[in-house]
Amino acid sequence: MLEWTQDQAMSQLDFIFDHLDAICRGGLARYQEYPADIRIEHDSRAKFACIYSHMETAAHARLSDLSNVIHKDIGGLKVWIVGEKATIRFKKMDEDGRTRNYPTKQAKDFDKQLPLPGIPCPPLNLVVGYWPNSLGTDVERVQVARPMGKAIDWCAAIVPTDSRIVGQPRWYDVTRQAQLG
């Protein structure tokens, strides 16, 4: 299996950083537009399902017209193939880039960097998502993580579009070092 560096992986996505940032931030922002009396009725599963749905809708609106981005639904796993190398899926994340859900076989294979039907080989499977603030009302940062099974190889934060400085990096490494026992 080809080992992708963080720099190589992020360079595959650089041309859509603005879109990824807007998709993730927009999903949560759209959910916050719901009336408070509706949001209070949602358990965490319903809340995150709504936010994910808004992210998917935004992804279709922003990415579908790009010539080098293709959407695929592989047995329920919704992914975007970016260029000829990277495949992404959208998720809510924790600070380290980990996601939580009941993973399907396709999602487990994706996270193990295994090839799936219609995905370029060798795969570069990345998860793009938002890390919410402690109240769940705003996005702390939009992140890209490379899962390696249940572990995270690395995690990078995209610099928000409105915070970028010309000539400065458009992303930065937020991978935390493993604690030594």
Image (cartoon, grey):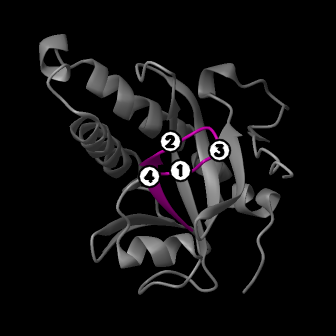
Task: Give the mark nearer the N terminus: 3 vs 1.
Answer: 3
Q: Which numbered tag is attached to residue 96?
A: 3
In the rendered image, residue 96 lying in the magenta stretch gets the answer: yes
Alpha carbon separation for disc pair 1 and 2:
11 Å
Q: Is residue 133 found left or right of 51 in the rendered image? A: right
Q: Mark 1 — residue?
A: 128
Q: Mark 4 — residue?
A: 100
**Mark 2 Cα-neighbour bin, 10 Å: few <14, some 14–19, many ≥20:** some
Alpha carbon separation for disc pair 4 and 2:
23 Å
**Residue pictured at 37% horizontal, 48% vertical:** 59
Q: Mark 2 — residue?
A: 19
Write the start and end of the magenta stretch as one range: 87-99
Q: Is residue 136 found left or right of 73 in the rendered image? A: right
The residue tagged with tag 1: helix, strand or loop?
Answer: strand
Alpha carbon separation for disc pair 4 and 3:
12 Å
Task: Give the mark nearer the N terminus: 3 vs 2.
Answer: 2
Query: Mark 3 or mark 1: which is in front?
Result: 3
Task: Give the mark nearer the N terminus: 1 vs 2.
Answer: 2
